[in-house]
Amino acid sequence: MTRDRRTGEESPTAFGVEEAGRRRPSRSARAPTVLRAFALDVEDDLLAALEPVLAQSPLRHMVTPGGFRMSVAMTNCGAVGWVANRSGYSYSPIDPTCGRAWPAMPVAFAGLATRAAARAGYRGFAPDACLINRYDPGSKLSLHQDKDERDLAAPIVSVSLGLPAIFLFGGLTRRDPQQRLCLVHGDVVVWGGLARLAYHGVAPLKIGHHPRLGGHRVNLTFRKAL
Ligand code: MD3
Ligand code: FE
């Protein structure tokens, strides 16, 4: 962990190894911005807004193009939603399970994402997609990059709720060394710059009990997909 000299915020360094003979990208370009407890003052609004979203577009286990059922249950809100199926990954305006539009992005969701991005230096971030991931004990997310969005210059904002998780992130290749970051209820992370393309994943969720979310972790991931 390092501390940003300007803001005092903790941020893990994103890339352990740099190419010999090249200038190291600045720390701010490589590292995500970790905003501890940033969502806590709106947690009631977030959880209240989540209910009707899940009622309209229920959580489901998507199947990857390779035929694997994902252990994380997912749904979306916003103009478009991330979907996986046998033919690939894409952003769709339609929820395939009900054939209708995804629920609108709640104002409390979008407002939080915009404020977090601004705090990290990204003014005017207006997400059009929010992927909602629900982890049960044992659920994990294998190492991957997020590259299905059109504008990779826009940051991704993630909000952690419920049980803590160990988040792994490496560099621009699968082989780069990985760092671990424990994310707990209320933490918000802004992934911009080089960190936006880092390989990342989530270790299997440990059993536990959270006063607001019971035996689960919920992650909200805000993106500009279109
Ligand atoms: C780093 N979700 O949905 S959020 C995903 O906790 C995803 O549910 C994880 O990875 C979760 O794709 C991690 C943090 C996150 C999201 C996007 C990133 C980290 C990222 C994109 C690039 C680099
Ligand atoms: Fe991801």
Image (cartoon, rainbow, N blue to C red):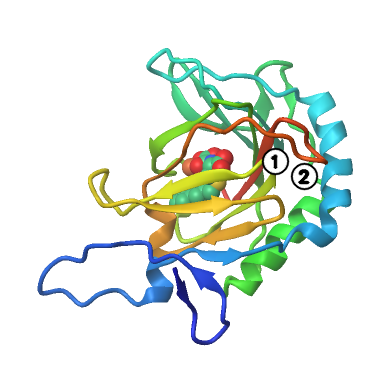
| Image location of residue 180, percent across then percent down | 43, 52
* Direction from residue 151 to residue 214 in the image, left or right: right
Q: Secondary structure at mark 1?
A: loop
| Image location of residue 71, percent across then percent down | 54, 22
Q: Residue furthest front?
A: 208
Whether the residue carrying mark 2 lies under 8 Å from ligand 1 is answered with no
* Direction from residue 119 to residue 197 in the image, left or right: left
Does label 1 or label 2 sit earlier along the sequence?
A: 1
Depth check: give the residue in front, 70 or 140: 140
* Quadrant of residue 86 within the rendered picture: top left
Q: Residues within 10 Å of mark 1 (few under 14, many from 20)?
A: many
Q: Which residue is mark 2?
A: 105
Residue at image x 44%, y 15%? Answer: 68
Depth check: give the residue in front, 58 or 32: 32
Q: Is residue 96 above or below residue 188?
A: above
Mark 1–mark 2 distance (CA, rounded to whole Å): 8 Å
* Quadrant of residue 67 within the rendered picture: top left
In the rendered image, which quarter contains the N terminus? bottom left
- Total numbered badges shown on the rendered structure: 2
| Image location of residue 222, percent across then percent down | 63, 49
Q: Secondary structure at mark 2?
A: loop
Q: Which residue is mark 1?
A: 79
Amino acid type, label 1: Ala
Amino acid type, label 2: Met
- Residues under numbered marks 1 and 2 in contact, where contact means CB atoms less than 8 Å apart: yes
Residue at image x 69%, y 58%? Answer: 113
| Image location of residue 165, percent across then percent down | 57, 43
Q: Is residue 80 above or below residue 86?
A: below
* Quadrant of residue 102 within the rendered picture: top right
Q: Is residue 212 above or below residue 94?
A: below
Q: Which mark is residue 192?
A: none
Task: Please indicate, yes or no, whether residue 138 appears anywhere in the rendered image.
Answer: yes
